[in-house]
Amino acid sequence: MLQESSPYLALARKYRPSNFEDVVGQEHVIAALQHSIDNNRIHHAYLLTGTRGIGKTTIARIIAKCLECEGGISSHPHLDGNLCSTCKAISEGTFPDVIEIDGASQTKVDDTRQLLENTQYPPMQGRYKVYIIDEVHMLSQSSFNALLKTLEEPPAYVKFILATTDPQKIPTTVLSRCLQFQLKALSIDEIASQIEKISHKEGFTCESEAAILIARAARGSMRDALSLCDQALALGNGKILRDTVLSMLGTASDELVSDILSLLLVNSNKSLEEVLLKIRQISPNYKTLLNDLVITFHDLALYQMMGNARSLNVFSIPSTTLDKYAKLLSPKALQLYYQIALQGLEEYKVSNDGATTFEMAILRLLAFTPEKKKIG
C-alpha cells in the first residue's frame, strides 16, 4: 500500500517565524516589544506599519503568543519543538481568543460593530482577547468611528494589534491611541543570507548570485523572496540557479547593465549595435531593465557622495560596478541619466512596445552625454 506523501508547504509558510528570535531584521521593533512585554507594560493597542511581506502579521501573532502562552506572559513563548497547545493553536489560527480580521474584506461598519460587540464578553480560554486587524487602513470612516469608541476605553482583557501598509489613511484620532512601530524593508544582504540559510536546511542547491538576484527582485519583502524561491525551484528542477533566476525574472545580468554604462563613457570600447543586439537576444523585461538603470544611477550618485560606506547596506548593485563607474561618470551626468531613466519608465506606461521605449531611453542617454559621442 502506497503511503501518502505530506503536502508541500510553501517556503514562506514553512519558515514563517514563530517567535521573536526567528524574525529577520526589525531589531529595533523586536527589542522594544520584548522590553515592554517582559516589564508587563502592555499597551492596549499596537500599530505595525511597513511595506508588504516584511512581518507585520507574523509579529502580531508572536505578540499574541507572548500574551497567551500557557507558560506565562513572556517575550519568549515556548519555542518550536516545545510549543504549548495555546501557541500551536495561535500558529494554526484556531485559538478562539485571538481573532484575525482582514480589513480589506470587512470594510462595512456593520462588520466592525458586530466584531466590537463581542469585546464585552471575557476571553474563553486565554488571558486576553486579542484582535489582529490586517490592512486596517481599508476600513470605512464609519468603521473607524466605531473602532475609536472601543480604543478609547477598551476592557482590560482586550488588546488590539493593527497592521497596515498605508498608515496615512488611518485617522489621527485612531493613530493617537496606538503604540506605533514602523517596520523597515529588509536589506538585500538580509534576504540573501536567509535564502542561503533555508537552502542549507532544505538541502537544495542555491547559487549565491541567484540568491542576490532574488533578494533584489523582492524589494525588501521576505515573503516575496521566498515565493520567488519556490518558483525558481520549480523551474530549476529543485535548484536555485543564476541563469534560471535571470530567465524567470526577465532581468538583465549585472554584466548587461555594465555594458550599458560603458556606452556612456568617453572613448567607450562598446558599440551601440553590439549592446542592443545582446539585449534583444536576451529579450528581458524592459521595464525591469529600465528600473535597474534607475537604481544603478541612484547608487552610483550616492556612492560618489558617501564613498565606500557599504556597511550601511544602502547599495543594490555590486561593489565592482560602484568602484569602476563612480570614478568614470561625473555627478552632473549621473543626475541627468537618472532623470532620463525615470522618464523612460513613465513613457513605458503608455507605450505598446517595451523594446522601443527602452531603446529610445538608451538613445536619449547617449544624446545627452556631456561629451559628444560617436554612435555605432
Image (cartoon, rainbow, N blue to C red):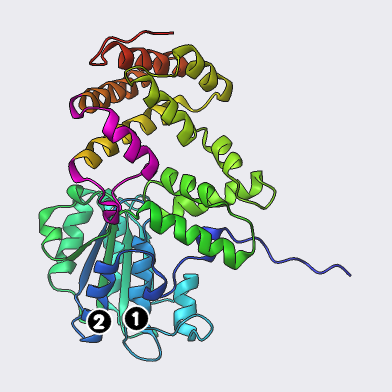
Q: Residues within 10 Å of mark 2 (few under 14, many from 20)?
A: some
Query: Which residue is rendered at x = 10% and y = 62% of the image?
Result: 176
Residue 192, position in %: x, y?
A: 45, 55
Which mark identifies residue 66? Answer: 1
Q: Which residue lies under the disc numbered 2?
A: 37
Q: CA distance from mark 2 to mark 1?
A: 8 Å
Give SS at disc 2: helix
Give SS at disc 1: helix
Q: Within the image, what quadrant is residue 131 found in?
A: bottom left
- Left or right of residue 269: residue 174: left
Observer able to see residue 123:
no
Amino acid under label 2?
Ile
Query: In front: 101, or 238?
Result: 238
Query: Which residue is rendered at x = 28% and y = 67% of the image?
Result: 161
Give the farthest residue toward the bottom.
71
Residue 224, position in %: x, y?
A: 45, 50
Quadrant where the image shows the C terminus:
top left
Whether 82 is drawn above or below 369: the answer is below
Residue range highlighted in magenta: 305-332
Residue 171, position in %: x, y?
A: 14, 52
Amino acid under label 1?
Cys
Q: Residues within 10 Å of mark 1 (few under 14, many from 20)?
A: many
Query: In front: 309, or 233?
Result: 309
Q: Main secondary structure of the magenta part?
A: helix
Query: Which residue is rendered at x = 44% and y = 73% of the image?
Result: 18
Marks 2,1: beta carbons within 8 A: yes
